[in-house]
């Protein structure tokens, strides 16, 4: 008889499997919104992904899933200002752990949403310069 689980669990493998499950739900929500234009089901799957993140908390999953959820799905349901705040928090978390690619994307979309809201362009420009300086120095 073959054993499915060994006595020692590999915590890294478990973290990655949780990440892929959470990312799959977020991705499914994205496809429901973008391709099927089924916004309510897209929101449902995005909420499932966010709830799973609350219970598991691998940081790399948090960054990528928050980006997917707040950049592409939740903008249909929450004010852009809230999405912008969540994306800026994602940028800060990515900078803290060294995920500069996702940080750059999150910062760009966060500032774009502020621009679409009618935020003063000089404030957005100043914020962009300040945050890009942080990225370069990191």
Image: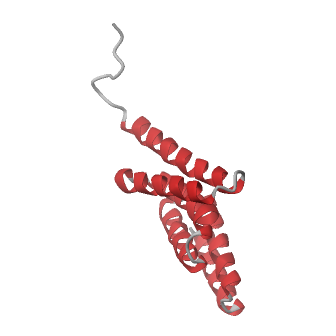
Q: Where is residue 44 in the image (x, y as percent from the top left)?
A: 51, 55
Against 92, residue 63 (above or below) is above
Residue at x-position 57% and y-position 69%? 77
Residue at x-position 65% and y-position 64%? 105
**Quadrant into which the N terminus falls:** top left
Against 110, residue 16 (above or below) is above
Q: Where is residue 82 in the image (x, y as percent from the top left)?
A: 53, 76
Q: Where is residue 21 in the image (x, y as percent from the top left)?
A: 49, 42
Question: What colour-coding does the image apply?
Answer: secondary structure
Against 74, residue 5 (above or below) is above
Between 68 and 99, which is closer to the camera in this rendering? Answer: 68
Question: Which residue appears farthest toward the top when viewing the image?
Answer: 1
**Quadrant into which the C terminus falls:** bottom right
Residue at x-position 48% and y-position 53%? 49
Between 126 and 112, which is closer to the camera in this rendering? Answer: 112
* Res. 136 image quadrant: bottom right
Against 77, residue 7 (above or below) is above
Lateral position of residue 115 relative to residue 3, left or right: right
Q: Residue 117: in sight, yes or no?
A: yes
* Res. 113 image quadrant: bottom right
Question: Could you tell me how many numbered marks the image carries?
Answer: 0
Q: Residue 100: in sight, yes or no?
A: no
Q: Position of residue 122 (x, y in %)?
A: 70, 92
């Amino acid at each position: 008889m073959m054993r499915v689980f060994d006595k020692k669990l590999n915590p890294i493998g478990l973290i990655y499997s949780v990440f892929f499950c959470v990312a799959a739900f977020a991705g499914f929500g994205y496809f429901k919104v973008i391709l099927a234009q089924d916004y309510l089901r897209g929101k449902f799957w995005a909420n499932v992904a966010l709830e799973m993140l609350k219970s598991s908390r691998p940081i790399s999953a948090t960054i990528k899933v928050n980006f997917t959820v707040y950049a592409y799905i939740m903008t249909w349901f929450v004010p852009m200002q809230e999405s912008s705040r969540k994306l800026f928090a994602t940028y800060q978390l990515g900078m803290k752990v060294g995920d500069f690619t996702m940080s750059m994307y999150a910062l760009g979309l966060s500032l774009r949403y502020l621009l679409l809201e009618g935020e003063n362009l000089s404030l957005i420009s100043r914020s962009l310069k300040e945050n890009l300086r942080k990225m370069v120095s990191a």
